Image (spheres, grey):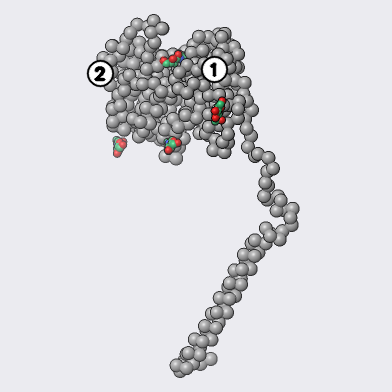
């Protein structure tokens, strides 16, 4: 009312008093309001109709997980056992699963002949696979752990066999040349198993030793290098990768009879968005496939061993994935029972991680049309093609790196 009148000390004190009272009132009001809000928020829970409460909280009267039914196929049952042992909820093993074979997984498993009804009629190599499928640890005979010293951008991991000296050399001279390419570091390793005396193969170990010394790019494990053991090659490589090469950015795993256009691969990786790297896995993807039941086929798997369909997988001729994913794939592989077909197995491990490989049309594991076989420009746009001889590799590589070749 009298804004310009100086206030006497008394009136100031009085005002303070009334202000304090006003403040306390507001505080009480605030608390009351807060309580009201709380009550309103909680209201539907406490005072809502009983029906809606029952709708919100459903307490199951029975177990809300499903204990798997016993599978009649050996692989599936072994997988059920593995799933069971990794399941944090299910603690007691059902009786039908408490049957885990010899304590040492690398002893031949005597259960297989009793549990697989047509075991005796299966091909010898399939029987061998079943007897040893629980063993995943084999010593290394040749380890060249310095391959990744330069933290390569791209590691080429090539599945080879001991006698394939010429294929390895052609790869070294062409698409697997180690060093800097397109301003990126590329490293190459060849993945090898061993021979067993029962197979009566000539002993080439001495020559392999020379090769290892000369090139420093061989990894060899002491298991019998056979088709059904290719899955071992995959798992042992992933383990080695985690220990010796974990910072490589990308891995291309392929056969020693494919041609890879390393320049094109580097080009693709260069343009890859950072957000895509973590789950990156591309190749020639096969979807909706299942096991072949015809005994005469290379990929035959009997019903007594595996039931079900395959997850999407990339053809084993060659696929490309990130190093980050390689580390996770190894982890996943410990939760997937070894399967006799290596590329299907990798698809199973990806599925365990909730992932699927992505199709890329540059991966031609089923070759290209014959009329393009000798067209230099066709190879410029491809990533991978199967199959090519060492001589063809050298010819195609010269086309790719030829500076004068003009392609439309
Ligand atoms: C499996 O069975 C054996 C006896 O056959 C028993 O001693 C063992 O405790 C069982 N293991 C589990 C995990 O139930
Ligand atoms: C080569 O790569 C390095 C790092 O990887 C980068 O700093 C440099 O700019 C690149 N050079 C060219 C010509 O792309
Ligand atoms: C895989 O390698 C192991 C170890 O050498 C061998 O015992 C087994 O028979 C091999 N499996 C096949 C299918 O060759
Ligand atoms: C692999 O699993 C181990 C333990 O289960 C975990 O510590 C590690 O982080 C995992 N590695 C990757 C790359 O997922």
Task: Tell me the residue that label 2 is attached to.
Answer: 213
Depth check, front residue: 50 or 1: 50
Ligand 2 falls in quadrant? top left
- The reply, left or right, for residue 280 in relation to residue 122 is left
- The reply, left or right, for residue 73 in relation to residue 355 is right
Depth check, front residue: 366 or 110: 110
Q: Residue at x 55, y 31 (%)?
A: 84
Q: Residue at x 63, y 68 (%)?
A: 36
Q: Quadrant of residue 116?
A: top right
Q: Residues within 10 Å of mark 1 (few under 14, many from 20)?
A: some
Where does residue 329 sit, x and y in percent of width and height? 45, 31
In primary-sequence order, the first of circles 1 and 2 is 1
Q: Quadrant where the C terminus lies? A: top left
Q: Is residue 115 above or below residue 6?
A: above
Where does residue 60 sit, x and y in percent of width and height? 68, 43
Q: Nearer the viewer, mark 1 or mark 2?
A: 1
Q: Residues within 10 Å of mark 2 (few under 14, many from 20)?
A: few
Give the SS element for disc 2: helix
Q: Residue at x 39, y 28 (%)?
A: 239
Task: Tell me the residue that label 1 is attached to.
Answer: 111
- The reply, left or right, for residue 149 in relation to residue 327 is left
Depth check, front residue: 312 or 339: 339
């Amino acid at each position: 009312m009298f804004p310009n009148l100086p206030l006497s000390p008394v009136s100031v004190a009085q005002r303070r008093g009334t202000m304090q009272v006003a403040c306390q009132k507001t505080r009480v009001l605030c608390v009351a309001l807060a309580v009201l809000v709380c009550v309103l928020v909680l209201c539907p829970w406490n005072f809502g109709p009983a029906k809606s409460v029952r709708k919100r909280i459903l307490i199951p009267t029975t177990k809300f997980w499903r204990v798997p039914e016993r599978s009649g196929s050996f692989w599936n049952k072994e997988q059920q056992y593995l799933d069971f042992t990794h399941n944090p909820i299910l603690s007691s093993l059902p009786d039908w699963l408490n049957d885990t074979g010899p304590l040492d997984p690398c002893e031949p498993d005597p259960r297989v002949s009793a549990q697989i009804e047509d075991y005796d009629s299966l091909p010898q190599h399939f029987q061998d696979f079943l007897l040893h499928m629980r063993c995943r640890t084999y010593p290394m005979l040749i380890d060249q752990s310095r391959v990744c010293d330069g933290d390569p951008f791209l590691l080429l991991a090539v599945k080879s066999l001991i006698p394939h000296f010429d294929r390895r050399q052609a790869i070294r001279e062409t698409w697997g040349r180690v060093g800097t390419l397109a301003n990126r570091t590329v490293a190459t390793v060849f993945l090898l198993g061993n021979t067993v005396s029962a197979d009566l193969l000539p002993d080439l170990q001495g020559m392999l030793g020379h090769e290892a010394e000369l090139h420093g790019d061989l990894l060899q494990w002491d298991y019998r290098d056979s088709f059904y053991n290719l899955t071992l090659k995959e798992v042992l490589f992933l383990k080695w990768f985690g220990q010796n090469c974990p910072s490589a950015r990308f891995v291309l795993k392929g056969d020693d009879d494919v041609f890879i256009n390393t320049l094109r691969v580097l080009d693709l990786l260069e343009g890859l968005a950072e957000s895509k790297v973590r789950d990156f896995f591309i190749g020639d993807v096969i979807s909706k496939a299942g096991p072949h039941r015809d005994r005469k086929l290379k990929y035959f798997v009997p019903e007594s061993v595996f039931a079900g369909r395959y997850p999407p997988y990339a053809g084993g001729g060659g696929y490309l994935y990130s190093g980050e994913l390689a580390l996770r794939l190894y982890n996943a592989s410990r939760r997937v029972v070894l399967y006799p077909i290596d590329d299907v197995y990798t698809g199973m491990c990806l599925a365990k991680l909730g992932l699927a490989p992505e199709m890329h049309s540059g991966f031609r594991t089923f070759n290209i049309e014959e009329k393009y076989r000798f067209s230099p420009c066709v190879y410029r746009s491809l990533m991978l093609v199967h199959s090519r001889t060492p001589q063809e590799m050298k010819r195609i590589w010269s086309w790719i790196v030829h500076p004068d070749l003009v392609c439309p």
